[in-house]
């Protein structure tokens, strides 16, 4: 049985991530003149993959990081019994319980910024550029949602000793946004 609220949440998250991808990638394609050849489709496919990749956190969490937690055991049971919809519903409803995710962390984000710069500046791969931009777009929107829901990025610090005041978190988020835009349009 699906919970109506979690279905709404999944649809909202899907709409936010893919809507932002469409708008952002459309602007990049228009700005760069990437619309007259099918080769530029690889950029878009990379972006789609990049937007999906950070959600692997939830699967890594229940399979490898915390398989003994009750939610992890329930999700594993549902997937094992091919109850995909119920498993996805459970993961959507409980996503904020997972506080030690790999991709949804400030440390990963800082590493990703460096990798994004390297891929975007030195790689000729449109697919690779799309992937890294899609990942960063996903993470930025997830952080924005956390600002709206809980007013800070505490879920992103995990066990890090990094302590930031709210204004520092907002500044960090704005800097990352600016870097993503610069990397997308300048390089």
Image (tube, helix red, strand yellow):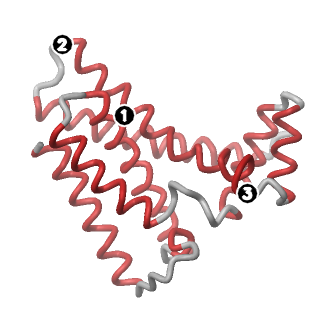
Between the residue at mark 2 and the residue at mark 3, the CA separation in whole angstroms equals 42 Å
Residue 3 located left or right of residue 137: right
Q: Secondary structure at mark 3?
A: loop
Where's residue 64, x and y in %? 71, 50
Q: Are marks 3 and 1 in contact (CB under 8 Å)?
A: no
24 up-or-down from 30: above or below = below
Residue 183: x, y in percent? 18, 48
What residue would you read off at disc 2?
Answer: 37
Say which element carries label 1.
helix
The residue beneath circle 1 is: 47
Residue found at x 69% / y 49%? 92
Mark 3, residue position: 94
In percent of the image, x 21 and y 60: which residue is there?
178
The answer to whether residue 159 is above or below residue 86 is below
Q: Quadrant of the N terminus?
A: top right
2 or 1: tag closer to the N-terminus = 2
Q: Nearer the viewer, residue 4 or 169?
A: 169
């Amino acid at each position: 049985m699906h919970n109506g609220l979690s279905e709404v949440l999944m649809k909202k998250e899907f709409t936010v991530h893919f809507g932002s991808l469409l708008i952002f990638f459309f602007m990049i394609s228009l700005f760069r003149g990437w619309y007259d050849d099918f080769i530029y489709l690889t950029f878009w496919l990379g972006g789609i993959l990049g937007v999906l990749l950070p959600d692997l956190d939830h699967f890594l969490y229940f399979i490898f990081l915390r398989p003994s937690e009750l939610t992890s055991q329930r999700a594993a049971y549902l997937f094992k019994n091919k109850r995909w919809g119920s498993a996805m519903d459970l993961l959507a409803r409980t996503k904020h319980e997972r506080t030690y995710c790999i991709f949804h962390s400030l440390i990963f984000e800082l590493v990703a910024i460096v990798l994004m710069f390297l891929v975007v500046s030195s790689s000729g791969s449109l697919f690779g550029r799309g992937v890294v931009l899609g990942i960063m777009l996903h993470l930025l929107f997830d952080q924005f949602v956390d600002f709206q829901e809980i007013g800070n990025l505490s879920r992103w610090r995990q066990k890090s000793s990094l302590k930031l005041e709210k204004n520092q978190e907002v500044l960090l988020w704005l800097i990352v946004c600016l870097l993503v835009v610069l990397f997308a349009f300048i390089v």
